Image (cartoon, rainbow, N blue to C red):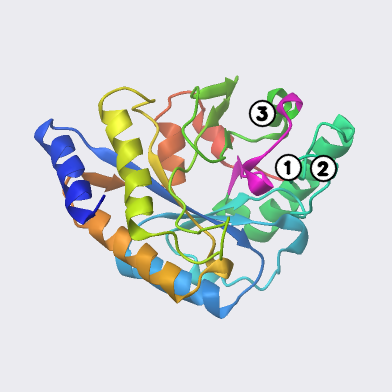
Amino acid sequence: MTGWADLQEELDHWQSAGRVATLWWRDDDLVAPTPALDRLLHLRDHVDIPLALAVIPEKANPTLPEEKLEGCVIIQHGFAHENTAPASEKKCEFPASLPLDQRLGALAEGRDTLAKLFEDRFLPALVPPWNRIAEDMIPHLASLGFIALSRYKARKAELLAPRLIALNTHVDPVNWRRDRSALPEETVLKMLITHLAARRMAAMDAAEPTGILSHHLMHDEAIWELLSKLLTFLTGHPAVRWISLHTAISLSGEIPEEAFLFHPPA
């Protein structure tokens, strides 16, 4: 059974090798101020680590509390988070069955919405709903101003297209296939340790920060407790370095600094 001692041991291996285990945190589905958002931001303040908030543009409430977003960046979570895939396919907002221009147009509209709402707090990175996007869109994302595409599971390559990097998440504590409560603690720890160990031993891209994924609107008490325990444990180990999304993208060396700020058309 995988436990906290195993995570401690893995991080100790990083420390003994003089290496730093980089991690980042992404939370999906933000649309409006809610008690769940307040709790998320309180947790962020408590552990004092950067947080990337993936906002659904078409549903974004302009009263989202700017004054509470210290330590956070806003990134784009699709357009409306609506499934438009054929019934025979997995859920996807941007399936290949829709015209390419229609899909790209929706992304551009959402990008402009978030840039106007959040100004310099908006970072032009895309999180496709359900972590799925038709492959024919990827070569066009940089031309829309996006500098990163974030999905789930270890990336196969850092650079997806010129000026577009992959920066994924790898640990999600929600049991989506059953009751949508917390996965068993040992399952979550195994996911985390597996990715960290694979990076350390170069079985996966060692440069990709390990990503923690949360969904504040979905969290019951069990998920909140597990997430808090996990973040607190990680923050307390000297081998761990939590990095912002901006830093994670910058470390690639592939994206010019001026691309991090998107200015919508007047």
User: What amino acid does circle 2 point to?
Assistant: Ala
The structure residue drawn at horizontal position 27% and vertical position 34%, both measured from the top left corner, is: 197
Mark 2 or mark 1: name the one nearer the start of the chain: 2
Residue 142 disc label: 3
Residue 85 screen position, x and y as percent: 82, 42
Mark 2 or mark 3: name the one nearer the start of the chain: 2
Mark 2 surroundings within 10 Å by alpha-carbon count, few (fewer than 14), some (14 through 19), many (20 or more): some
Q: Which residue in the rendered view is the most extreme toward the top?
A: 162
User: What amino acid does circle 3 point to?
Assistant: Ala
Residues 158 and 125: in front is 158
Q: Is 127 inside the magenta-drawn segment? A: yes
Against 192, residue 202 (above or below) is above
User: What amino acid does circle 1 point to?
Assistant: Lys
Which type of secondary structure does the marked residue at label 1 adopt?
loop
The structure residue drawn at horizontal position 54% and vertical position 80%, both measured from the top left corner, is: 35
Q: Is residue 183 left or right of residue 2?
A: right
Q: Is residue 265 visible?
A: no
Residue 145 disc label: none
The total number of labels drawn is: 3
Against 7, residue 65 (above or below) is below
In the image, the segment drawn in magenta is 123-136
Where is mark 2, residue-wise? 85
Residue 151 screen position, x and y as percent: 57, 40
Residues 26 and 130: in front is 130
